[in-house]
Amino acid sequence: NVVFNCHQCGRTYQSRHNLVKHLRFECGGQKHFACSLCPSRYTQNGKLRQHMLNAHNIFVPPLHFRKKNLLSEIMFGSISANN
């Protein structure tokens, strides 16, 4: 069996795909998703949403859900398209 090792943290993976995912989102990923209530930062929006719920008891809907709601609000006139 071939094993793929992370050179940064030492974790091992049985597939190259999973190692690449790990490097992109965990060890090597840029933490673009910042919590607005504390200094925590995450590489994935889902991890930030999970943090908001667990640490601050705040539910944040997924991005795709929020985009659909915004589009509906624009289409049905509850907010203007210029906002």
Image: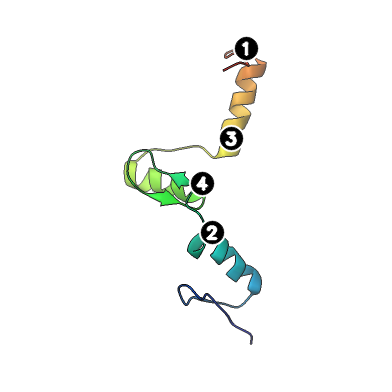
Tag 4: residue type?
Asn
Q: Could you tell me which secondary element the residue under label 1 belongs to?
A: loop
- x%, y% of residue 11? 49, 75
The residue at which mark 3 appears reads as: 65
Mark closer to the observer (4, 3): 4
- Mark 2 in CB contact with mark 3 (< 8 angstroms): no
Q: CA distance from mark 2 to mark 3?
A: 22 Å
Q: Which residue is disc 2 drawn over? A: 25
The residue nearer to you, when weighing 1 against 59, is: 1
Identify the image quadrant of the C terminus: top right
Residue type beneath disc 2: Phe
Q: Where does residue 12 sit, x and y in percent of width and height?
A: 53, 78
Single out the mark in the foreground, 1 or 4. 4
Q: Are marks 2 and 1 in contact (CB under 8 Å)?
A: no
Q: Residue at x 45, y 51 (%)?
A: 42
The earlier-in-sequence mark between 4 and 2 is: 2
Q: Secondary structure at mark 4?
A: helix
Nearer the observer, disc 2 or disc 3?
2
Q: Return the mark for residue 45.
A: 4
Please state the horizontal and vertical placement of residue 20, each as a whole percent of the image.
61, 67
Sequence-first disc among 1 and 3: 3
Question: Please, is residue 73 above or below residue 68 in the view?
Answer: above
What amino acid type should be assigned to the residue bearing mark 3? Phe
Tell which residue pokes out farthest to the right in this image.
75
